[in-house]
């Protein structure tokens, strides 16, 4: 499970972090294509850390990665217990 959790963490950091850097930090796309042209919220009591970005990072890493990892491990375990060599020798070897 730890390997899957680390892989999911890296994927989230690279994909979501890369998209954030590209779209918000470096402004590659500009404001014409944005759904909401307002800047990201800061110094608001609505967010746990007072900042929308840090709040999103926290809840993604603390909530999304562990739940997604658990779900993936349960699915893999359930699928692996359904496959036997006598029923599907190609899938067991692959």
Image (cartoon, rainbow, N blue to C red):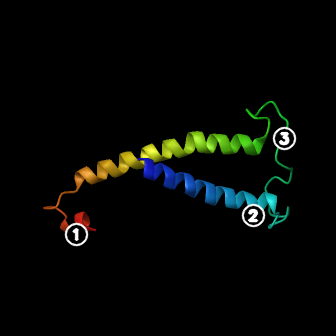
Tags 2 and 1 in contact by the CB under 8 Å rule? no
Taking the view exactly as shown, the residue that stands out farthest to the left is 86
For marks 2 and 1, give the CA distance: 42 Å
Nearest the eye: 7 or 47: 7
- Is 59 located above or below residue 27 in the figure? above
Q: Say which element carries label 1.
A: helix
> Which residue was labeled with disc 2?
22
Apparent side of residue 48 relative to residue 76 in the rendered image (left or right):
right
Mark 2 / mark 3, whichever is N-terminal: 2
Mark 3 / mark 1, whichever is N-terminal: 3
Residue neighbourhood size for the residue with mark 1, other residues' Cα within 10 Å, grouped as few (<14), some (14–19), many (≥20): few
- Is 12 located above or below residue 26 in the figure? above
- Is 28 located above or below residue 1 in the figure? below
Per the rendering, the mark at residue 65 is: none
> Which residue was labeled with disc 3?
42
Q: Which residue shows up at 23% across the image and 67% down it? A: 93
Q: Which residue shows up at 84% across the image and 40% down it? A: 42
Quadrant occupied by the C terminus? bottom left
Q: Say which element carries label 2.
A: helix
Per the rendering, the mark at residue 90 is: 1
In the image, residue 84 lies at what x, y percent? 18, 57
In the image, residue 57 lies at what x, y percent? 67, 45
Mark 2 / mark 1, whichever is N-terminal: 2
Q: Say which element carries label 3.
A: loop
Taking the view exactly as shown, the residue that stands out farthest to the top is 45
């Amino acid at each position: 499970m730890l390997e899957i959790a680390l892989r999911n963490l890296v994927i989230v950091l690279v994909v979501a972090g890369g998209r954030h850097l590209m779209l918000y930090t470096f402004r590659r796309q500009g404001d014409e294509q944005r759904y909401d042209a307002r800047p990201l919220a800061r110094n608001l009591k609505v967010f746990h850390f007072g900042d929308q970005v840090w709040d999103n990072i926290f809840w993604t890493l603390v909530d999304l990665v562990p739940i997604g990892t658990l779900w993936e491990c349960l699915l893999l375990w359930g699928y692996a217990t359904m496959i036997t060599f006598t029923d599907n020798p190609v899938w067991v070897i692959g």
